[in-house]
Amino acid sequence: MPSGCQIEKLETTYFENPVDFRHEVIYFIIIDRFYDGHSDQDQRGEGSELEDSKGLYDRTRQDWGKYWGGNLQGVINKIDYLKQLGVTALWLSPLFEQVSDLQFSRAPMHGYWTRDFKRINPRFLKVGESNSISESETLKALVDTCHNAGIKVVLDIVCNHSSPDINGCKGVVLDDGTHLADYHRDDKDFYYHNGEITDWEDEYQLIHCEMMGLATFNEKNIEYRNYIKAAIKDWLDAGIDALRVDTLKHMPIWFWQEFSTEMKNHKPGLFMFGEYGFSKPWEQRSVEYANNIGMSILDFGLCDGIRFCMSGKEPGGFYQVEKVLAYDRVYHRANELVTFIDNHDMPRFLSIVSDKRLLDLALVLLLTLRGVPCLFYGTEQYLCNNTDGGQDPYNRPMMESWDNASHPFQLVQTLLRLRENNQALAYGSHNTAWVNEDFYLYTRNYRDSAVMVMVNKSEHEHVVNAEHIRMPDGDYICHLTGRTVSLSNGHLQGFGVPAKTAMVISVAGQPVQGQVVAVFQLNGFETQPGQSVAIVGSCDELGNWHHDQAYGMEYVNQNTWIASVAFDHDAARLVNFKFLVKQQGAEPIIEYVINRKLLLPEQGTIAVDCFWNAAA
Ligand code: NOJ
């Protein structure tokens, strides 16, 4: 059957591993606190050069500021455990070579005080192993082991700063072993010299002053930019799949645009997400960054919402979560925000809410709400230390249990299997059927896939009487409790959900299948009731430019529509298309663009991210 596409099938492969990160589940590891994979004492640094005279390493693991001996081999040894859990991407704390000194009795076990961005921290390798990115056997083994297990590797990178003043030495940076810069002898203008930030509302200060005394790079210096970009490319060449980017807030938008463009040119399909500290959907600058720097951000807003809801630190219960989700339309891509309930910079969830049943409920929210969820290592084993309220460094205990039969492990595993098998969690809209401070009932919906979640955080049973639930009628078995839930006409009446319990039911639907599946997402047209978005284009699948045969998209939120389109005949061809907005009782609004062009790969799934072109 001839297609409307205009050029012959291409013979060459133009795409490599296109990545759709909305399906991923990230697991964040502080390397030093995860596992020591070296059985041999020498490899742990005892009596070796790594246990230096400055005493950065504490083999007894009592001194929280020092290295405790976790390493890359330790991560390799635990890949089977992580695979079983069901996570699909590992965010590793920074691997760069660090300054080798203590500041206020603390060593850079966290990885944020870099000395050489082109070398690996030798403490994470075998003693005597080359710490060059391209030569390290352990880095290669880690990447290969992860990839063989279907797990992506996310590197944590820092572009904003190098190291603080330690004994008169600050910001000394090497370029693959060769001296490059020194804050105190800054003849090449690598650094800003404006002192500490004093006013956190002042954008000039955020960018040009220091945070915690860290030597802050002068991004206007092209030599600095060339260095950092070359360094990160070396890591991408070593097989790193995605980047977590530190301190977005402290560098200008233009820098991030240049940086992300160059990284993505170097590695097409690269996913990047960054830390804009304490971002909120109602805080304009953080949203501006999220939408304009070519990468997603960590969703501090939802993290707060879930923590406030469960801890009661702020009033409102589940309305705290609803309030954040209600702002989703301000983001171009809310379903790519990286969501979390705790991390290495805040007390672990169990330090603020000691009731483990509430952590279970928070995990249900994290793993079923929109966004790409990120688990902090050990949460799946209730890892926690409450010293000093669980503040840094006590939020970074050594991982101590690998029990795959524990209740939290199995809870996470069950929910991750559901994420893997049900597209509604990666792509779907969020539909609240019932909410009050203590009880929340919502569905996630995509095409014919749906997941329904009920969470009761109160001390009492909640009797559900809800209507307009977007689930097909039927009897469902709850994934978490094994109980049967029966829906009829979208109603659930007189159904008791016990105190501090969550229930999850689902229908998996039929994912779109084809030689190529393109997941189109359109943002930037704020639809009103009665409007819907469709794709029209140059081939059969897209209606051959006939508006009435355009491919209908699914609503995600007012600002986001999504569609999975199967292409068989048109694989490896060029498709022309544009978006249009259908309106009840009126002519469609056609996008103001001559044609968008999409070169399809030969096979696989690709994400096609688009922003509405309005008439000038
Ligand atoms: C944010 C990181 O998450 C934090 O742990 C680090 O100390 C600062 N940035 C400085 O790099």
Image (cartoon, rainbow, N blue to C red):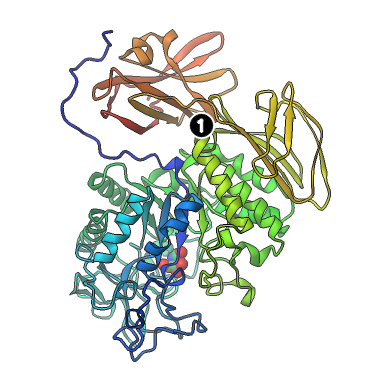
Is residue 28 something one can see in this rendering? yes
- The quarter of the picture where residue 163 lies is bottom left
Is 603 left or right of 409, judged from the image as shown? left
User: Residue at position x 37%, y 15% from top?
Assistant: 541
- The quarter of the picture where residue 47 lies is bottom left
Residue 406, given in percent of the width and then of the height, sits at 61, 59
Q: Is residue 119 above or below residue 261?
A: below
User: Residue at position x 37%, y 55% from top?
Assistant: 154
Quarter of the image for the C terminus: give it: top left
- The quarter of the picture where residue 100 lies is bottom left
Residue 420, given in percent of the width and then of the height, sits at 49, 40
Q: Is residue 413 above or below residue 63?
A: above
| Secondary structure category for the residue under label 1 | loop
Q: Amino acid at mark 1?
A: Asn
User: Residue at position x 35%, y 54% from top?
Assistant: 146
How many residues crowd mark 1 within 10 Å: few (<14), some (14–19), many (20+)?
A: many
Q: Is residue 479 above or below residue 50?
A: above
The image quadrant where one finds ligand 1 is: bottom left
Is 598 left or right of 360, judged from the image as shown? left
For disc 1, the marked residue is 559
Residue 62, given in percent of the width and then of the height, sits at 52, 84
